[in-house]
């Protein structure tokens, strides 16, 4: 038996079909035996397709005609050379050549489809693998192995044991109008968010903590005490020049109830807006009587019986506006950026809190410290976080707010990140921080109403 020779059929897109040729035979003689196969151009393929041709004469076309077809194919440039790149079936009596092997299975694609099938199964869709006929081109047509549902514990739905599943669960809660209620305080908690250093996340923290609490059953009022009015912008509350604002409450003794506005999309959240007029309040408050406690008097006259939290957003200073917020509140939440400058200015804030506590508000305490703008890529952020935790201990929340583009984008749409992109890393971090704050109510007992 001579070495196998291959004959390339036109239209096979470069694939060669090797056919064993007996000793002493010729291409013309071979063509005569396969003349009955389906025609392709001037040649004929075996009736068995790519599996090759069985030995023995089966054709009725004269050898001369077949040879002419072969010569015509050669003149057209079709390959007629021997091709031994394919294996042949061992001789078992019938000389049948082995055609091209099936395309290699794409195991990576199969694993991807298997993963999608598992997700669909967990979500309760009943599918464990997608339909192979609908797979994209280039992926294997072999179906992914089905995963037995009986092998997994019954979860009653989607498990939030991965970041993606957790993000999806939060998004569903927000889209449906809120999640499960968190513990509520027995009395309204008044909390001021202060740090004289700018850009540490005071406004962002105030808005997103308030939104997260409101989404979980709490009634919240945000008082914007920053002349820039960023909290009002983030909550999409009108604060143009001439709008009734906190300025009118502090300087003109206007009732707080007249300026409070509801926040669209969050029925349990309200906002007392700030305008640029508040920038001059520091000077105008100087000659007034009891200038440090004017906000406290306004809140005391406000009916807060239906509120669970009053959150005050302070300006980046230690002036009269910040002092007013410290006198009015019972708790201080300090956001600390995970950088060295934030630690440097913290000493001044602590000194101011001690002065206010000693002379104006004996009930004032620092209840919460929140690490913000954490960048896990830097050693400095980890070192600052470690120093803060070692110094303040249990006051520091376990949740850390990472740097997030979504958190920065949300105010431009008049939303908190909790409603803008509830599945983002920033939203999830603020959600966990708000939950920790709500769980602090368990230390004194939740509300009964």
Image (cartoon, rainbow, N blue to C red):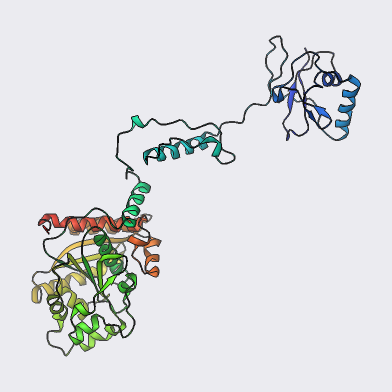
Q: Is residue 253 above or below residue 214?
A: below
Horizontally, residue 66 falls left or right of residue 2, namely: right
Question: In which image quadrant can residue 339 be found?
Answer: bottom left
Nearer to the camera, 53 or 323: 53
Furthest-top residue in this view = 93
Tell me where residue 333 appears, x and y as whole percent: 21, 65
Tell me where residue 386 appears, x and y as whole percent: 26, 55
Q: Residue at x 27, y 65 (%)?
A: 267
Question: In which image quadrant can residue 295 be found?
Answer: bottom left
Q: Is residue 91 above or below residue 179?
A: above
Furthest-bottom residue in this view = 287
Q: Is residue 71 above or below residue 265?
A: above
Tell me where residue 413 appears, x and y as whole percent: 39, 68
Quadrant of the image containing the C terminus? bottom left
Tell me where residue 422 appears, x and y as whole percent: 35, 57
Q: Is residue 380 visible?
A: no
**Tally of numbered discs:** 0
Nearer to the camera, 65 or 334: 65
Q: Is residue 248 visible?
A: yes
Quadrant of the image containing the N terminus? top right
Q: Residue at x 73, y 34 (%)?
A: 14
Horizontally, residue 110 falls left or right of residue 432, namely: right
Nearer to the camera, 284 or 260: 260
């Amino acid at each position: 038996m001579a070495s196998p020779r291959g004959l390339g059929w036109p239209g096979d897109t470069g694939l060669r079909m090797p056919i064993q040729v007996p000793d002493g035979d010729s291409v013309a003689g071979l063509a005569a035996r396969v003349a009955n196969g389906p025609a392709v151009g001037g040649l004929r393929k075996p009736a068995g397709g790519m599996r090759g041709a069985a030995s023995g004469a089966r054709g009725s076309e004269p050898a001369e005609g077949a040879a002419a077809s072969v010569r015509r194919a050669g003149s057209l440039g079709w390959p007629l050379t021997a091709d031994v790149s394919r294996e042949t079936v061992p001789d078992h009596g019938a000389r049948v050549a082995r055609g091209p092997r099936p395309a290699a299975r794409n195991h990576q694609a199969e694993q991807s489809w298997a993963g999608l099938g598992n997700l669909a199964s967990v979500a309760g869709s009943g599918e464990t693998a997608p339909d192979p006929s609908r797979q994209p081109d280039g992926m294997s047509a072999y179906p992914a192995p089905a995963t037995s549902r009986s092998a997994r514990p019954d979860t009653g739905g989607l498990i939030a044991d991965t970041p993606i599943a957790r993000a999806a669960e939060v998004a569903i809660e927000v889209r449906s109008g809120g999640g499960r209620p968190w513990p509520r305080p027995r009395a309204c908690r008044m909390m001021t968010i202060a740090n004289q250093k700018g850009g540490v996340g005071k406004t962002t923290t105030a808005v997103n903590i308030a939104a997260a609490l409101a989404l979980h059953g709490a009634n919240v009022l945000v008082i914007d005490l920053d002349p820039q009015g960023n909290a009002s912008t983030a909550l999409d509350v009108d604060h143009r020049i001439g709008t009734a604002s906190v300025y009118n409450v502090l300087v003109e003794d206007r009732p707080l109830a007249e300026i409070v506005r509801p926040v669209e999309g969050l029925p349990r959240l309200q906002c007392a807006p700030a305008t640029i007029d508040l920038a001059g309040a520091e000077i105008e408050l100087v000659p007034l009587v009891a200038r440090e406690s004017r906000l406290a008097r306004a809140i005391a006259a406000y009916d807060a019986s239906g509120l669970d939290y009053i959150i005050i957003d302070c300006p980046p200073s230690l002036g009269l506006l910040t002092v007013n917020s410290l006198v009015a509140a019972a708790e201080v939440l300090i956001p600390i950026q995970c950088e060295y400058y934030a630690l440097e200015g913290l000493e001044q804030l602590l000194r101011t809190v001690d002065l206010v506590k000693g002379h104006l508000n004996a009930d004032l305490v620092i209840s919460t410290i929140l690490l913000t703008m954490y960048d896990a890529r830097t050693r400095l952020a980890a070192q600052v976080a470690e120093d803060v935790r070692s110094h303040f201990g249990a006051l520091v929340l376990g949740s850390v707010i990472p740097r997030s583009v979504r958190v920065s984008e949300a105010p431009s749409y008049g939303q908190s990140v909790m409603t803008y992109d509830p599945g983002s890393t920033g939203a999830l971090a603020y959600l966990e921080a708000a939950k920790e704050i709500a769980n602090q109510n368990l230390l004194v007992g939740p509300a009964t109403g």
